[in-house]
Image (tube, rainbow, N blue to C red):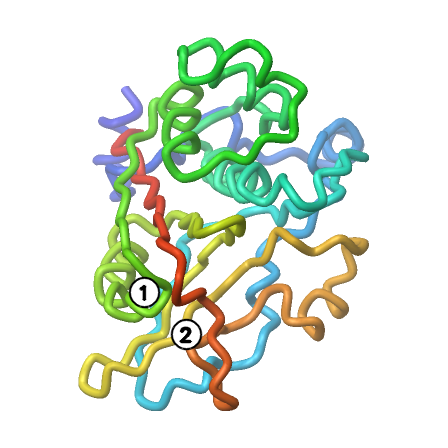
Amino acid sequence: MRRNLHFRLGLPLDRPLLRTSNALTFGAMEMRDRSSSKSSSLLRDVHKEIPSSGVSGGIMSLIDGSYEYYHYLHDGIDDNGWGCAYRSLQTIMSWYRLQQYSSINVPSHREIQQVLVEIGDKDPSFIGSREWIGAIELSFVLDKLLGASCKIINVRSGDELPEKCRELAIHFETQGTPVMIGGGVLAYTLLGVDYNEASGDCAFLILDPHYTGGDDLKKIVNGGWCAWKKSVDSKGRSFFLKDKFYNLLLPQRPNMV
């Protein structure tokens, strides 16, 4: 029925629009819904306030839709030093929720761990631990909780990441989902790339889950916690580590109404 209505109204046939979760609310009902929303205090779409990338003649390919910014110390959980991939996963999950592909709450660290134990990927002792997770574990959780498939790109060194800019640009243009980049002991959320195909110059729009402060948009932007990053900056400093391999998790957009 929804597909027929989408067709008759000229709406896209690959994303849910005519669902009760998209319904407009007014007045007292709207205030009630806002006050009961578990994630209403989280910052959304922080990348919209940041300066340009510095790539001359580049074409920007960005996330399509809204997300919430999850980072260290959210929800009273002290995950400083071990929870960056969990936070990246929570940001990705928020994208699926805000685009109405899912109505489940964004899972906590413990709930993520429970999923990995339930599917047999981890031993029961993993629940409540501070063990790191990576791109593979994130793909398992997305599949289990949302039925979302993922593509994974492997690179042997941080130096090779610029070579993946074209592939990442295609991802953002066709799928539009946030990407998790994991390498060594660090994980980041990627929201887009700015790529000049002729020169090869590129920059990565990084949302950094390692931020430990309050949800102050000005502080986050000025501190570079959401910013364009080049593989090697103007001072010769490498953002991605040369001696570490990286896995990139590219969640796929469900084709559904």
Q: Residue furthest front?
A: 243
Residue at image location 53% in from the left, 48% down from the top: 185
Q: In screen coordinates, is 80 left or right of 228?
A: right
- Cα separation between marks 2 and 1: 8 Å
Q: In screen coordinates, is 74 left or right of 61?
A: right
Q: Nearer the viewer, residue 80 or 73?
A: 80
Q: Residues within 10 Å of mark 2 (few under 14, many from 20)?
A: many
Q: Amino acid at mark 2?
A: Ser
Q: In screen coordinates, is 52 left or right of 222?
A: left
Q: Is residue 131 above or below residue 12?
A: above
Q: Which one is earlier in the sequence, the residue at label 2 or at label 1?
A: 1
Instruction: Check if mark 2's residue and mark 1's residue have beta carbons within 8 Å.
Output: yes
Query: Which residue is labeled 1 in the image?
Result: 161
Residue 148, image quadrant: top left
Residue 100: percent from left, percent from top? 46, 33
Q: Nearer the viewer, residue 161 or 62?
A: 161
Query: Which residue is labeled 2 in the image?
Result: 231
Residue 253, image quadrant: top left
Q: In screen coordinates, is 156 left or right of 75?
A: left
Residue at image location 81% in from the left, 35% down from the top: 76
Q: Is residue 41 above or below residue 207?
A: above
Q: Amino acid at mark 1?
A: Leu
Label drawn at residue 112: none
Q: Quadrant of the C terminus?
A: top left
Residue at image location 61% in from the left, 16% down from the top: 127
Residue 147: percent from left, percent from top? 34, 22
Q: Quadrant of the N terminus?
A: top left
Residue 229: percent from left, percent from top? 48, 73
